């Protein structure tokens, strides 16, 4: 049986047997363990309750020769199905290759009333070593871990005078580290420039980029009705459309973020930071662009490349406070920031591949309808192989609860007569 056809208990057991999930983590997931009350109360103001979402995995995503099980939290039924399908197609072609530039996060300290920006820039450059010392004193533990303030830059956006701090946050996402350093450095600059800073905070724009690439043999892309090379050519055309049609680029990127947001949320990271950085990057040229692009090579292979910033960490903040995020990090094998970034980028790329292949082939509604039928079957109490049989029985009748109940009842009656 395929992984999705197993019961939840069987899936957990399969992951434990494969050495991909510990017994303790399987028990944690099986028990639908809620957040400890104290954690829930401390993570939000005015807490009233908890809000549950399903956690699943995209199976067997191959990235740089290693196979990952990618935990995802999402309420959209087709997302994990598409990701797993995309991962399967990529694996048939040797998997995804991914690279990242060094994990650096920037902070900006901006002043409004600098009469002589050239002199101020000179001052900051001449006394950068002092700012480095202030930063180190503000956050000594990040220096002990080999990170901290790496560089100081000066610029003048519009009428403002800006000092940019380039910080290495090591295993952390960096928001707290950068903000602590930025406020300390801002206090020193306030004295030097004889005025308060207008703002001292990290930017969620990121110069650090992760790139995921896959090279596909079109023969692996065929569907029941369409030949693989036709699918490959149409995927390349649909990708090209997204480069010149913003309406399409937005939806193209929404599909990519279906996977990325779900994996980021499961990992305990800040989805809004990632979204803000990614969308700014997509619009950086002045024309909103697709994050992943596909083209046919001279030899007929289909090459896909996704490039984006991913401001994430593997320690700190909610990541450490949320027990489910800890489980997800172990299951995902996110041993460091680079691994998380590369796996997430690869996921976005295969998510896009699955979406485009469906769009240029049978369309996405066929798949969505099957998933909806299975969800209905489960909702009316179908179990085990009944789920697919009830779903099949809903193919030719309206997909609603009443019909699902009737199909299930008929099936069970057949079994007992
Ligand atoms: C649906 O959630 C995502 C898609 O619309 C993405 C796309 O159109 O590329 C299928």
Image (cartoon, grey):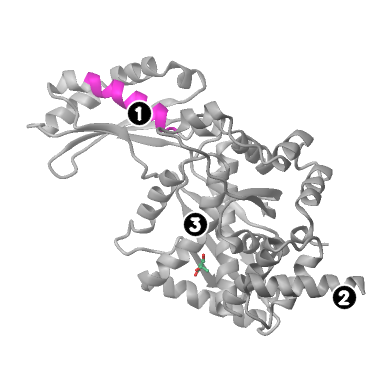
Q: Position of residue 308 (x, y in %)?
A: 46, 52
Q: CA distance from mark 1 to mark 2?
A: 66 Å
Residue 104 falls left or right of residue 260: left
- Compared across the picture, whether 44 is left or right of 100 comes to left
Specify whether residue 59 is in view: yes
From the image, tell me which residue sits under label 3. Answer: 257
Q: Is residue 317 left or right of residue 389?
A: left
Q: Which residue is mark 2?
A: 414
Position of residue 148 in the picture relative to residue 9 (left or right): left
| Disc number for residue 412 | none
Residue 179 circle label: 1
Which secondary structure, mark 1?
helix
Which corner quadrant holds the N terminus?
bottom right
Q: Give the residue drawn at x 91%, y 70%.
A: 416
Q: Nearer the viewer, residue 23 or 224?
A: 23
For the C terminus, which image quadrant? bottom right
Q: Indicate yes or no whether the magenta region holds residue 181.
A: yes
């Amino acid at each position: 049986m395929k992984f999705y056809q197993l019961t939840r208990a069987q899936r957990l057991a399969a992951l434990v047997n494969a050495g991909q999930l510990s017994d303790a983590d399987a028990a944690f997931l099986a028990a639908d363990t809620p957040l400890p009350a104290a954690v829930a109360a401390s993570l939000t103001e005015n807490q009233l309750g908890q809000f549950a979402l399903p956690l699943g995995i995209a199976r067997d995503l191959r990235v740089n020769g290693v196979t990952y099980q990618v935990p995802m939290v999402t309420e959209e039924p087709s997302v994990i199905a598409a990701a797993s399908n995309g991962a399967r197609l990529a694996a048939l072609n040797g998997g995804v290759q991914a690279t990242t530039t060094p994990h650096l996060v920037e902070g900006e300290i901006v002043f409004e009333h600098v009469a002589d920006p050239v002199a101020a820039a000179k001052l900051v450059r001449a006394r950068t070593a002092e700012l480095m010392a202030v930063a180190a004193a503000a956050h000594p533990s990040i220096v002990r871990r080999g990170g901290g303030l790496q560089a100081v830059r000066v610029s003048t956006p519009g009428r403002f005078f800006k000092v940019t701090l380039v910080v290495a946050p090591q295993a952390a996402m960096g928001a707290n580290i950068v903000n602590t350093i930025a406020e300390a450095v801002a206090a020193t600059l306030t004295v030097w420039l004889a005025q308060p800073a207008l703002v001292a905070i990290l930017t969620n724009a990121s110069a650090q980029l992760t790139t995921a690439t896959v090279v596909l043999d079109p023969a692996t892309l065929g569907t029941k009705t369409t030949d693989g090379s036709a699918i490959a050519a149409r995927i390349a055309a649909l990708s090209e459309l997204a480069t010149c049609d913003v309406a399409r680029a937005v939806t193209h990127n929404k599909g990519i973020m279906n996977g990325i947001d779900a994996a980021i949320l499961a990992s305990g990271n800040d989805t809004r930071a990632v979204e803000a950085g990614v969308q700014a990057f997509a619009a950086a040229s002045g024309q909103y662009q697709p994050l992943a692009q596909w083209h046919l090579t001279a030899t007929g292979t289909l090459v896909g490349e996704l490039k984006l910033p991913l401001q994430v960490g593997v320690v700190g903040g909610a990541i450490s406070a949320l027990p489910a995020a800890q489980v997800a990090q172990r299951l995902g094998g996110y041993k460091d920031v680079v691994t998380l970034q590369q796996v997430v980028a690869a996921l976005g790329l295969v998510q896009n591949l699955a979406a485009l292949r469906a769009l240029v082939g049978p369309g996405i509604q066929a798949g969505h309808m099957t998933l909806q039928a299975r969800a209905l079957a489960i909702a009316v109490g179908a179990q085990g192989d009944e789920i697919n049989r009830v779903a099949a029985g809903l193919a030719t009748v309206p997909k609603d609860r009443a019909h699902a109940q009737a199909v299930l009842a008929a099936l069970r009656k057949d079994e007992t007569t």
